[in-house]
Image (cartoon, helix red, strand yellow):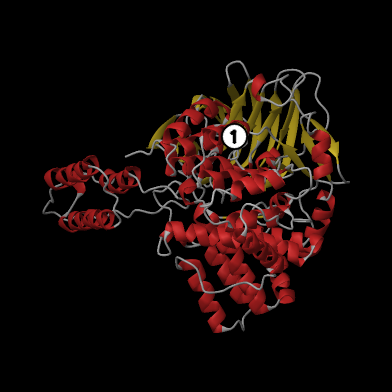
Amino acid sequence: MKTPCIRILKLQVNNKLSAINPSMINGNSLNNLRFSLQLIIFEVVDMKYFYSMKQVLFVGISLIILFTFCKPEVKEKEPIVETRRPDPHSFSRPDIAVTKHLELELSCDFQQKQIRGIALYDIEHKSADEIIFDVLHLNIDSIDLIDNRTAVTKASYKYIENDEVLGKGLHVKLNSNTKKVKIYYRTSADAIALQWLNVDQTNTKKLPYLLTQSQSIYARSWIPCQDGPGIRFTYNAVVNVPENMMAVMSADNPQKRSTDGRYTFTMDIPIPAYLLALAVGDFDFKPIGNRTGVYASSDILDKAVWEFADLEKMLETAETLYGKYPWGRYDVIVLPSSFPFGGMENPKLTFLTPTCIAGDRSLTSLLAHELAHSWSGNLVTNATWEDFWLNEGFTTYFENRIMESLYGKSYADMLSLLGYQDLKKTIEEMGDTNVLTKLKLDLEDEDPEDALSDIAYEKGKTLLRYLEERQGRADWDGFLKSYFEKFKFKSNTTEGFVKYLDEYFPTMNKGVRDTMQKWIYNPGLIAFQPNYDNSRFLFVEKQLEELLKKPGAYKLKTRNWSTHEWLHAIRKLPKDITKQIIPNLETNYKLHESGNKEIAFAWLKYKIENNINAKEIAKVENFLLQVGRRKFVLPLYESLMKNGHEKEAKAIFTKAKSGYHPITSNSVNEALYPRI
């Protein structure tokens, strides 16, 4: 969770001031504005937003402008009615004019590191005057309108809104009979969704690489679009890349390279813009099952096929739980190490981090999570990012049910317990009264990325586990099947979920329903401990008790320990006051050499917190130069900063940042150089 910054305050005040037309303000509206600004001042003072005199001066000047220049007139005017956009993170107004299908043509220029594109949209409207697209650092060259007789005319367009996070609102003037809008555009060097990797940054060192990450609001940086999760459209695409390179999208994909570098794609199921995805590079395909397979570079392709051997079984298990898989094929692509997330649930083709290849199939719960998104997220989507828990809470719950079905309850419960530990730690750090610990969020004027945490995932999952235990698993599974069927290929809100739950369980216990409401709309945690089997973790804790009696000599009984037992052990280790625990575990278990990135990350973080020396800092640096997954990268930099290694952290980042995705790089930069 980032420290509240002046940007949020600026947005709050600017939203008030930008609506002011001095010639139209009457006494009542002026008083209302004064009162609103006073509330903002009181709120930011109370929440300790003021960290510098610059911020104090900003608010003071805003108030002077308001009270000096906005003088009331005696004559009363008709009140101005302002409406909130359907999605606070999109300038588009789908209620006025909406995109329904996209014909996309892209040319990927690896020398200029630029995509040149033509986006042809079929649109629906009722004689609307305009359609609004979201753009972020895009260069628009021209726009054409096509009417119902296929006549083409040049469009008039302008940018009205401008926000440092959301980008701009591209307002395209329409004719009453406009059926299609054709936009010619180019991406810029600031396109946050795109990462262009040089040859020496790839695995095979033969060809460069391009990958995208559109979630949450970054599709608008490489395609002009109505970039809200509540807007769905189908698409076809033609992508032109250099010869000998492979290209794949979130669509029906080729399994062999094109000889001329031209690829065609079809997605005939409507999806939101954040699920648009593209990867171009030196990689190939191998099947796993009838509907599943892996794309990866030649050096890791066979390893990935072995690691993901249970992928087809996962798909079949998911179908038995919550209904037929609706997307045809389910393939995955293992991306370069710079990919910022564990996985991204792009339909038909999950984008995946190479850190899940541990050599022992111990980290495949990540695959189960992304597969589960095929139902919760891709099939039924959160209407806005304020309802993000509907995507991630459901998916985390579903992931665990897949793992339980395949590997047993005790194994799945270890995963759940680790997640619950993460949840409690997050709430402790954020504060149990923090509004961002609610499931249903109010993100007006806030970057949705600032609100992403374990809350949506683990608090959402725990709520669903609570409902499962109260309603009974059989009835709960019946509800989930019905829910996915009811809302398939649609977007839903938290309120829509609650309403349907009430309809499905009309006799639900009032206490259960009241608790559910508190869980959703109140911050913090409800006092509920799911019925997890913790016997394997209790054994780990007993081993640690023996270790602490003889920190330099005792050998843990670790035979058959999974990754999850090791993670629990490392998390439970006390501060190494004796300076014997770390040498013991490294000598006996070679944790410092672990190829399992989850274990390596946890171990390095523990060592940073125990005053490591320059030699150990070099090991942290080596990890940060090899891994770009933000889940690992950001906490290590933060730990270095908190434990007296600020200089080293900044020096490592200077070396490593060119290999990070812009999303990761921006997050680390804010941690190392916080804005005042």
Would residue 124 be seen by someone viewing this image from the given angle?
no
> As drawn, is 237 to the left or to the right of 40?
right
Image x and y of residue 64, in percent:
14, 44
Question: Residue at the spot x=76%, y=49% of the render?
Answer: 327
**The C terminus: image quadrant:** top left
Question: Residue at the spot x=51%, y=47% of the render?
Answer: 610
Label total for image? 1
Pick whichever, 521 or 560, lies toward us: 560
Q: Is residue 33 above or below residue 133?
A: below
> As drawn, is 195 to the left or to the right of 611?
right
Q: Which residue is mark 1?
A: 619
> Image quadrant of residue 282?
top right
- Secondary structure at numbered mark 1: helix
Would residue 585 be seen by someone viewing this image from the given angle?
yes
Q: Residues within 10 Å of mark 1 (few under 14, many from 20)?
A: some
Q: Is residue 357 above or below residue 296?
A: below
Pick whichever, 241 or 556, lies toward us: 556
Question: Residue at the spot x=43%, y=64% of the render?
Answer: 432
Q: Is residue 514 above or below residue 1?
A: below
- Under mark 1, the amino acid is Lys
Image x and y of residue 55, in percent:
24, 43
Image x and y of residue 488, in percent:
68, 58
> Image quadrant of residue 461?
bottom right
Question: Residue at the spot x=75%, y=27% of the render?
Answer: 263
> As drawn, is 216 to the left or to the right of 319?
left
> As drawn, is 32 to the left or to the right of 460?
left
Pick whichever, 271 or 427, lies toward us: 427
Pick whichever, 25 or 501, lies toward us: 501
Image x and y of residue 254, in percent:
80, 33
Residue at the farthest right position: 290
